[in-house]
């Protein structure tokens, strides 16, 4: 008879790789054999978020970092660490928790990904990250002093780097730091950095000719006009995110080389009435078309939730890229039913649509979705347009959508993932899974699977 004790450890680890969440600790309690198989998966990623913080502050739970310190042999399994919150005591970062983080980081020699978006915590933890040769990806809330910023030079061989809310001290060292990352860095995201200006950005991008991903969002001195002047230094870019302002300055001509561009995201900001933004967005699409990129994914985010994306812009987008687009995302904005119909009819390879599902117009919305023969996933991007109480998407709504949409097989709404399959007797059978639909805390403009 086959039992867990008879299975090779590699087989057990492979089985456990398909488990997540609370299933992992539950399986670990079954037997010593299952525990051995679960451990690598259980400690592969350590994420610390609000839910864990509440238990720590009340003394009900210990931190996962304390567990690693107590059992240092577990550190070899840790590959990813994500810190989204730090417990507070007397308005200060909890000193015991911070010490546990720092000590655990020192012994996690195989760490590949480190993310910390907590103000004041990064500076304390940076020394523990120095010279980790396997560290490939870092996301940092980088409001640092001059001495603290100097420690960033010790983060070597990074392949992906995200800097958020950086101080001028960090901006000042970025050209020299990226110069040391020329051979390895392929993705760079600069988010909400007031001090970033064109000269610094030029110095940074000149160091990174092999960059595949460039995301400069929420940096008021580096809008779309700046990006298109400087992107000439990164001709291999495949994913690009930028902030469009109301700057009506003409774009550089000829258009910069972007023949590899596949994913494009617009963070659209405006304050003027009437705003020139619709014309500016159209001019950007026309500008990059000259490079003939095979655009597969497009995301746009508007500053006001009640605003509807203009039909002329949608028509231009579909006309230029309808044959290649596979994913479209409309965040904090609405899309007219006419535009939904145009998208589904003319984007012949569309697979996923992220849009606010109009519950009050669900029937015409679903009929428009049925015009697509390739669309298989709809993601409801929350209540961005409807006013007042919004009806909740129910199973019968999802079943209707999947019955009318011949290829629609997944609907994501909040933390609900509805999956459908076609049964020869029962018709469309819908099942519900409750879990997070995307990585917690990830930036909206970053491309996802």
Image: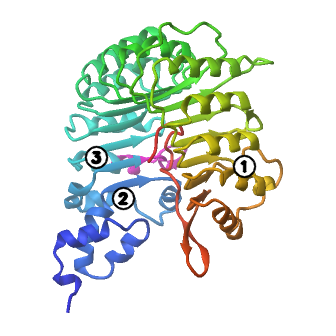
The vertical placement of 228 against 124, above or below, is: above
Q: Earlier in the sequence, mark 2 or mark 1?
A: 2
Q: Residue 199: where, in percent of width, then height?
A: 43, 8
* Quadrant housing the N terminus: bottom left
Number of residues whose C-alpha sits closer than 10 Å to that of mark 2, classed few (under 14), some (14–19) or many (20 or more): some
The vertical placement of 181 against 448, above or below, is: above
**Mark number displayed over residue 64:** 2
Residue furthest to the right in view is 388
Circle 2: element type: helix
Q: Nearer the viewer, mark 2 or mark 1?
A: 1
- Residue under label 1, please give it: 383
Q: Magenta span covers which residues?
A: 83-99
As measured in the structure, the alpha-carbon distance from the residue carrying label 1 to the one carrying label 3 is 40 Å
- Residue under label 3, please give it: 105
Q: Is residue 173 left or right of residue 37?
A: right
| Foreground of the two, 368 or 167 | 368
For image coordinates 26% across by 22% down, the residue present is 182
Splitting the image into 4 quarters, where does residue 102 fall? top left
| Foreground of the two, 259 or 273 | 259
For image coordinates 70% across by 51% down, the residue present is 357
Q: Nearer the viewer, mark 1 or mark 3?
A: 1
Q: Is residue 211 magenta?
A: no
Is residue 150 shown to the viewer in this render? yes
Q: Residue 3: where, in percent of width, then height?
A: 22, 86
């Amino acid at each position: 008879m086959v039992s867990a004790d008879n299975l090779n450890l590699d087989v057990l680890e492979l089985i456990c790789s398909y488990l997540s969440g609370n299933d992992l600790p539950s399986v670990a309690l079954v037997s010593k054999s299952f525990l051995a198989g679960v451990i690598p998966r259980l400690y592969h990623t350590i994420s610390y978020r609000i839910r864990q913080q509440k238990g720590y502050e009340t003394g009900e739970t210990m931190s996962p970092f304390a567990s690693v310190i107590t059992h240092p042999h577990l550190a070899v399994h840790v590959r990813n660490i994500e810190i989204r919150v730090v417990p507070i005591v007397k308005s200060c970062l909890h000193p015991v928790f911070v010490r546990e983080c720092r000590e655990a980081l020192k012994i996690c020699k195989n760490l590949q990904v480190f993310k910390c978006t907590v103000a004041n915590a990064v500076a304390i933890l940076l020394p523990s990250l120095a010279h980790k040769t396997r560290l490939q990806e870092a996301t940092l809330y980088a409001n640092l002093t001059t001495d603290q910023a100097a420690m960033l030079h010790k983060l070597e061989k990074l392949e992906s780097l995200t800097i958020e809310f950086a101080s001028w001290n960090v901006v000042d060292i970025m050209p020299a730091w990226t110069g040391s990352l020329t051979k390895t860095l392929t993705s760079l995201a600069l988010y909400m950095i007031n001090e970033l200006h064109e000269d610094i950005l030029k110095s940074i991008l000149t160091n990174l000719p092999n960059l595949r991903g460039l995301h400069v969002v929420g940096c008021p001195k580096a809008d779309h006009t700046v990006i298109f002047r400087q992107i000439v230094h990164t001709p291999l870019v495949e994913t690009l995110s930028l902030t469009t302002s109301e700057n009506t300055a003409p774009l550089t001509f000829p258009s910069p080389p972007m023949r590899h561009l596949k994913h494009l995201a617009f963070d659209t900001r405006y304050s003027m009435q009437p705003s020139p933004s619709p014309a500016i967005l159209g001019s950007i699409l026309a500008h990059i078309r000259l490079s003939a990129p095979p655009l597969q994914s497009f995301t746009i985010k508007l500053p006001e939730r009640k605003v509807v994306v203009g039909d002329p812009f949608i028509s231009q987008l579909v006309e230029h890229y309808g044959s290649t687009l596979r994913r479209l995302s409309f965040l904090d904005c609405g899309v007219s039913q006419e535009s939904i119909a145009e998208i589904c009819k003319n984007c012949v390879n569309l697979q996923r649509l992220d849009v606010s599902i109009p519950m009050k117009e669900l029937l015409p919305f679903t009929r428009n979705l049925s015009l697509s023969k390739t669309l298989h996933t709809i993601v409801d991007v929350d209540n961005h347009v409807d006013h007042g109480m919004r009806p909740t998407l129910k199973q019968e709504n999802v079943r209707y959508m999947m019955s009318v949409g011949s290829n629609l097989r997944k609907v994501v709404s909040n933390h609900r993932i509805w999956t459908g399959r076609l049964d020869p007797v029962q018709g469309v059978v819908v099942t519900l899974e409750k879990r997070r639909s995307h990585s917690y805390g990830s930036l909206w403009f970053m491309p996802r699977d």
